[in-house]
Image: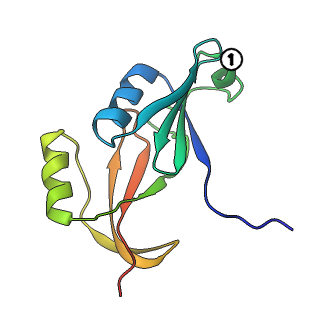
Amino acid sequence: MIKIKNIDHVVIRARNPEIMIRFYFDVLGCRLEKSSEKIGLYQLRAGASLIDIVSIDGELGRQGGRAPSEGSRNMHHFCLRIDPFDEQEIKRYLVEKSVSYSDIETHYGAEGYGPSMYIKDPENNVIELKGPANA
């Protein structure tokens, strides 16, 4: 029987991996854990999980077909649980980094209903930043 513990990693195909990696470093605080230039794979540590950036021109990226474009994305969104979730500090930080964000709303997630907001990476992939469940 399969018992899921958590999401191990997500893979994002990118037209410009360098710009994407810089965003995930500078804005979200990820760090490069492992890479394989030969196949176009860059694995970024995101808390207990990994975010893999795959070049669409690399060996792995070509397996996914055409590149995502303005009208089509890799996925609807993925969600990162943020701790602590200080709304004002997060907003201030995103403004400082010139990253647009949505209003904070209450959405359901793995821990229950709690605050969340949405941002986009440089290739328009949507990232939900989620706080703890409401008491």
Whether residue 55 is visible to the viewer of this picture, yes or no, is no
Residue, x 35% and y 34% (percent of image)?
25
Q: How is the image coloured?
A: rainbow
Asked whether 1 or 126 is in front, the reply is: 1
Where, quadrant-wise, is the N terminus in this rendering?
A: bottom right
Q: In which quarter of the image is residue 67?
A: top right
Residue, x 37% and y 36% (percent of image)?
24
How many numbered badges does the structure rendering display?
Answer: 1
Where, quadrant-wise, is the C terminus in this rendering?
A: bottom left
Residue, x 54% and y 48% (percent of image)?
49
In percent of width and height, residue 70 lies at 43, 34
Residue, x 40% and y 74% (percent of image)?
107
In percent of width and height, residue 28 lies at 33, 43
Q: Which amino acid does label 1 sit on?
A: Glu
Q: Is residue 118 above or below residue 132?
A: above
Q: Dot 1, how many residues are within 10 Å of its Cα: few (below 14), some (14-19), or many (20+)?
A: some
Q: Determine whether, in the image, residue 69 is placed left or right of residue 99.
A: right
Q: Is residue 130 above or below residue 35?
A: below
Q: Is residue 53 above or below residue 47?
A: above
The secondary element bearing badge 1 is classed as helix
In percent of width and height, residue 43 lies at 54, 32
Q: Is residue 78 above or below residue 74?
A: below
Q: In which quarter of the image is residue 38?
A: top right
Q: In which quarter of the image is residue 35?
A: top right
Whether residue 111 is visible to the viewer of this picture, yes or no, is yes
In percent of width and height, residue 133 lies at 39, 78
- Seen from this angle, which residue lies furthest bottom? 135
Residue at label 1? 59
- Seen from this angle, which residue lies furthest right? 1
Q: Determine whether, in the image, residue 87 is placed left or right of residue 116.
A: left
